Image (spheres, rainbow, N blue to C red):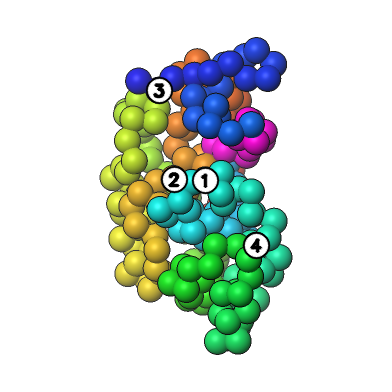
Amino acid sequence: MSVTVSGPDGRSRCGWCAAAPEFFDYHDKEWGFPVADDIRLFEKLCLESFQSGLSWRTILNKRDNFRMAFQGFDFRKVASFDEADVARLLSDVGIVRHRGKIEAVINNARCACELADAEGSLAAFIWRFEPRDETAPPQSRSTSPMSVALSKELRKRGWKFVGPTTVYAFMQAMRLVNDHAEGCVMRDEAHRARAAFHSPS
């Protein structure tokens, strides 16, 4: 069962917030709230892939640097990156300098252009994978049938570093699933936000 901790205001939050002070703000303002913006969705998929093998705190603290390095994660701009850009990024101490992940972002940007052109938007495609029911207890698993399905479809379309665990973390953060802990004050907030959200089509 997921645990909670007391936040700065004395109210309960998801237990993982206790790992770093900056997590509370990220948790309350971003994590688990629905997103329809293609750039934000692409950014989050990229950052989750960079997190693989690292801590989210490392990525969150470098997020502004990542945004500068990758043109705000505008995938139509990143799609034009070449070997000179890869060399530039590998020398950028403000980001995670992993050649495979850097090259994956560029590859995925090109795939994102194709996907957005084919499906109307990234959001329209991604939100088709929202589960119709959520039976698993919050934060009780690292993958789900729908994260497996979305991962499989992305990889079929050429995306890289989008395994089921990475995709599930993305789905948690973008509110395709409500994984705020039972008792967390943001669980009901996230539920209300989803109820008011119109799925892209």
Which comes before the other along the chain, label 4 or label 2?
4
User: Mark 1 near mark 2, Cβ–Cβ under 8 Å?
Assistant: no
Cα distance between the residues tagged 4 and 1: 15 Å
Mark 3 or 1: in front is 1
Under tag 2, what secondary structure? Answer: helix
Q: Residue type at mark 1? A: Trp
Under tag 1, what secondary structure? Answer: helix
Residue tagged by mark 2? 169
Residue at 60 percent across and 48 percent down: it is 60
Cα distance between the residues tagged 1 and 2: 11 Å
Q: Residues within 10 Å of mark 3 (few under 14, many from 20)?
A: some
Which comes before the other along the chain, label 4 or label 1?
1
Mark 4 or 3: in front is 4
Magenta-highlighted residues: 22-33
Residue 137, magenta (yes or no): no
**Residue 106 placement (x, y as % from top left):** 52, 75
Q: Which mark is residue 56?
A: 1
Residue at 64 percent across and 31 percent down: it is 21
Q: Which mark is residue 2?
A: 3
**Residue 53 placement (x, y as % from top left):** 40, 53
| Residue 86 can be seen, yes or no | yes
Residue 23, magenta (yes or no): yes
Under tag 3, what secondary structure? Answer: loop
Residue at 34 percent across and 67 percent down: it is 155
Q: Residue type at mark 2? A: Ala
Q: Residues within 10 Å of mark 2 (few under 14, many from 20)?
A: many
Indicate the quadrant containing the N terminus: top left, top right, bottom left or bottom right: top left
Q: Which mark is residue 94?
A: 4
Q: Residue type at mark 4? A: Gly
**Residue 151 placement (x, y as % from top left):** 35, 57
101 is higher (above) or lower (below) than 177: below
Q: Residues within 10 Å of mark 1 (few under 14, many from 20)?
A: some
